[in-house]
Image (cartoon, helix red, strand yellow):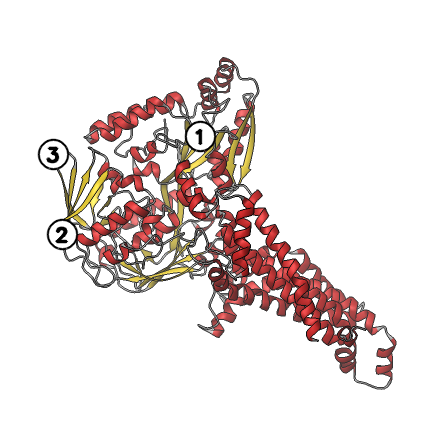
Amino acid sequence: MTRFIAGRLISALPVLFVVSLVSFLLIAVVPGDVTAEIAGADSTEAQRQLIREQLGLDRPLPEQAVRWYANLLQGDLGQSYLLNRPVTEAVFERLPVTLSLAGIALVLAVAIGMLLGILAAVRHNSWVDQGSMSVALLGLSVPDFWLGLIFITVFAVGLGWFPTGGYVPIAESFTGWVVSMTLPALALAFTQVGVVARMTRSSMLDVLGQDFIRTARAKGMRGYTVILKHALLNAMVPVVTVVGVMTGVLLGGAVVIESVFSLPGVGRLIIGAIQRRDYPIIQGGLLITAAIFVFVNILVDLAYGWLDPRVRHGR
Amino acid sequence: MAKKWKFGTTARHIGASLLLASVALGAPYASAQTRGGSITVAQSSNPPSLDAMVTSSQASRNITMNIYETLYGFDDKIQPAPILAESVEVSADGLSYAFKLRQGVKFHNGKEMTSADVKASLDRYKKVGATQTMLEPVTEIEATGPYEVTLKLKSKAPTFLEAFASPRAPAVIIPAEEASKPANEISFIGTGPFKFVEYVPDSHVKLERFEDYSANEAFQSMDGFGGKKTAYLDTVTFRVIPEPGAAVAALESGEVQLLEQIPVPTARRLSSNDDIKIYENMPWAVLTFIFNMKEAPGNNLKFREAVQAALNNEEVMAIATEGLFQLYHGWMYEGSTYDAGDVGAQSYNVADPEKAKALLKEANYNNEPFSILTDSTIPEHGKAAVVIAEQLKAVGINAVINQTDWPTALKIRLQDTGWNGWTLMMGIEPYLGPAALVSTLTGAAPHFRANDPELDKLYQELISTDSVEGRKAVFAKIQERLYQFVGIIKLGETGLMQASRANVQGFKPFRFPRMYDVWLEGQ
């Protein structure tokens, strides 16, 4: 098992290296100039050159890259040009917001999606099946930012049940945190509900048609035991795969949802940095987000092992 | 040129009825002011810094001008008026400015403000201030008494006080021990009516009433950036809500009491809502079109004249501002001190395609591409560029649009090549007066890249003329020159729609949301 985990971790390193390299090089080809942002639109070339020298942006690109990687190996992602603070500090401060959002959305998407998928599979070709799949299709078709705005209009402005936006840290108030996260997480989750529901349904239908299910039923096992214990567990592997991919989609979607609900998350930090060409934040933010994605997918790999002993034992 | 109001009549009626209401209520209106309560203000972006000296960003100014104060600042008539100073004595040779400070003014840390703090703050501004040219004429800053600071100038600079009072990146006074710290590393301590509590980036900035605030009793009420300020509210929270729809929703649900900016169509929709008040902050900014005078075809005066003749400013402004605009040819706002009257009016909003075509012929224009640089970050820029391009195509100019994001556009237009025209909204410069406006068009980095020697000369004359009357005359010549050599075209003026809940009282639209002298009804 340890070797299995170690292998997965080592295989993640090249992925992270490529991400860091691409994010570094993207910046070299993206037009725009952070020095104009710092010195102002009516600054002179001499003023901007001075800032360029102070930031080391006048050095050749390979030299900048070497310096960046040397610092990275020491866990230092550099200093933000415009926030006047270390990148790691700025990103980690906002990580709880984005992780709460994506995490809750993930749980909601999986819970609702699986429920719909199971119902649809068990009541195959009935109105329940068609109803569930319609909901799933709606989720796939509706953009999350639009749904977010509709949620705000209905549940925050109309009914007044939730705030229109803003973030309450969990340390400050648990209920406040739940209330502030409900609408954004639902809006983000809804688009993914469809993916999980459809995957669960088709995978359940496969399993339900197999001999061991008929055997289980034939020996008089209760219906829900058959479905939840024998069928579902076997139908889980493809669903878990989807969860791994979904993490990336949710982290990406969080960027938009954070803006709609005014949540101070990593997504908005990176967007703000892109708009103002704060390169270290863009690089560091991308790298940390990619690391999270890779880590979740390692967890998914481990989950395969738990769900399917054949994977664990390398058979 | 006649002034045209294009905004819907409903909103104008509201504005008028608000005005009437405040007049009609008179005395009871004043006595109804109540202490207490909290307000949340929403704005669309983060303040890049709360160190007021180092940034000229509006998002910062909205907040910092409630926390800090300057020695001098603009009053309602855009004239320099004392705020933390009591008065200023200018020596006969114009080389020495002795500022007498108000006594007993407390900082938010409880310490009294003295000349040592003022000297330290101004010394710091010389190092980190975002508009350092403001103190460029100053050679020496001296504490000439416990409550007196004297600035020595290297040469006479009659517009010095105007520049010094500028709120662009204000020369605020902070405690001496903070002033020794580098940019962005200070604790946010000022002398203003509200003191800083906390800042959570991308979320909010919270302020609370400063109980020991020393109001300026030399005034009856607030006046521009200064005057007698009274804080009624317990706390003011500036929330950062980037999505306009979400900001409006927060106002409608009552979570937010004041929106610093609201989309024009939404303002129209909300004007029938009794729970919401709409404010029209006009004029707020000037939309301009700038030529690159270093590259063909913009280096040809006849060509530039052709563009000026082709433009239908009304059409450009109507689309760019969603209807919230007024047309005025003057580079200073109508009725302001330096308004130059009719000068240039005949060349503004000409919209004469035939004249434009004739000028193009004179210019020997050969269908060279005319690349209009614009950005999507500020919607007015992009929309104006589209309309301008269509109007120019109609007279036979090969206009193409190069739309990027703001940092890219900024970088491209700082070069001598790669662009021919550029759309720019000037926010604070036209408000600050002639020197601030013209300084962006002269010197080492003029907006249109090449210097116009005549304009440079007039600028020097402007800043060395003693009297306001004299400067008015010089500015009229500048306005004439701007219409003659056509390096920059004024398209029109646009406003800012703001909104509050109906129970917010005393709010008067200004260059930043003044949260003092604002109170909540029924508090």
Discs 1 and 2 share one subunit: yes
Discs 1 and 3 share one subunit: yes
Say which residue label 2 marks.
Answer: B147
Give the CA distance from mark 1 to mark 2: 46 Å
In the drawing, what numbered circle is on residue B92?
3
Say which residue label 1 marks.
Answer: B290
In the drawing, what numbered circle is on residue A84?
none
Residue at x-position 46% and y-position 47%: A56
Q: Position of residue A210 (x, y in %)?
A: 86, 74
| The one of A80 and A257 positioned closer to us in this rendering | A80
Q: Neighbour class for label 3 at 10 Å: few (<14), some, many (≥20)?
A: few
Mark 2 vs 3: CB contact within 8 A: no
Left or right, B274 with reference to A234: left
Q: Which amino acid does label 2 sit on?
A: Tyr
Q: Nearer the viewer, mark 1 or mark 2?
A: 2
Give the CA distance from mark 2 to mark 3: 22 Å
